[in-house]
Amino acid sequence: MVMYPGQHGSPQTTLSSGCQAGDTTIVVANASILLTSGSLPFLMTIGTSTGFDSSSEVVLATNIATNTLTVTRGIQGTPYVWAAGSLCAILFTEYQNRAFSTNLGIALDEAPHTEYTANMMINGNLEMWQRGTSVSNPASVTLLADKFVITYSGIGSLPTLVHSRQTCAPGDLDGTFYFYRIAPDGAGSTFNAWSFYTLQHSIRGGTRDFAGAGKYVTVSFFARSNIANKRIGIGLQSRYGTGGSPSANGWAGSCVTLTSTWTRYTVTLPTPTNVGVTYGTNNNDYMILYIFIAWDGATWGEYNLGVSGTETFGASGTIDFARFIANPGMNEYTFMPKRYDAELKSCEKSYQVMSITTINGTFWLPFRTQMYSIPTATRSGGSATFANATTDGISVVDTSAESISVLLETGD
């Protein structure tokens, strides 16, 4: 709610002439005292010549010309026929008390108390690229930037698509060093029913922590494209984890049209109710954020994103993203980059690479960061094998000392 300035001493004057219920200008005896310590606009209460009561009217003064006030009538109370001599004062009204209480409640409820609530997304600033910095024509369910999964289905003919990390030009987006680029070499063709091409980001625990009837998530990001009128869809869905029921629930989506310059886009989406759902037993429920690059019109477009027409890749060109943030509630938060070490540790709960030197024998390799679940371990180089993995470490078995890289992947 809008809050208006108060004034010390609750200054008051009187109407120098009467006013009708529909008048939007009123004349007071001395308007100068109403501006002693405040500025336009301000709330003013009109009462009788003897005082103020429940029949008083609160008006909003938006302009003053000498002693003539331009006002919006009936902010509280009913517009009334007021006689000359009626008292006019700047008082602390019920409206102001309600505005203060409401805004304080919103601030306490939605303020970014922690890094999690300030931005539910991990690697939203796109600093972590542990798997590499470029991939051409990736398979579906491929990760490049940490936590961002390339997923697609149903498109008959994909163009050549290059995903890559790019460096921001100095001054373009202060506080952001890298951005994500998708470069198609054409539009693609044959977009069948339910076909799509997306980046997906899973917010672990987001369903239990932030979803529910009457709740919202606000997503904002910077984007640009040199492909004319390129549309991007944003979707949100709840997942209830292994053994949960239903496996997925609810859908909310929206669409924006990009321009050729960096622009911040904000979308507020309702979350589905959790009434009647069953959470899985592995504590792996999550909220999933979809960033649609292309989709068919009859299914994903009309039913889930609220737009008409199939959205292809458009043409040969580039589509750029930066500074993703998802926060609970309907208010848009200011983007604040997370500490590098904290962001890396969050990413390493899902994926980490460790360069080690083995021995002739068996030894225990502790992980740098405890992982979400027992990871799948693979190696680059050498002949070592692995056994007895936990979320904290793994046994390494080798027949000679050699340098290898251990890749640890949980799949999220």
Image: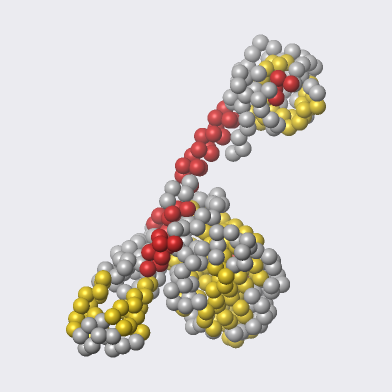
Query: Which percent across, then down, holds residue 180?
Result: 56, 71
Whether residue 388 is visible to the viewer of this picture, yes or no, is no
Q: Is residue 39 above or below residue 144?
A: above
Query: To which quarter of the image does residue 18 belong?
Result: top right
Residue in view at x 69 percent, y 68 percent: 260
Query: Which percent across, then down, holds residue 3?
Result: 60, 35
Q: Would residue 285 be found to the left or right of residue 267 on screen?
A: left
Query: Which percent across, then down, holds residue 130?
Result: 43, 74
Whether residue 161 is visible to the viewer of this picture, yes or no, is yes
Q: Is residue 362 above or below residue 107?
A: below
Residue in view at x 76 percent, y 31 percent: 63
Q: Looking at the picture, tell me which residue is in the foreground, 228 or 82.
A: 228
Query: To which quarter of the image does residue 396 belong?
Result: bottom left
Q: Looking at the picture, tell me which residue is in the foreground, 28 or 340.
A: 340
Q: Quadrant of the N terminus?
A: top right
Q: Looking at the picture, tell me which residue is in the foreground, 234 or 397.
A: 397
Residue in view at x 56 percent, y 34 percent: 99
Q: Quadrant of the C terminus?
A: bottom left
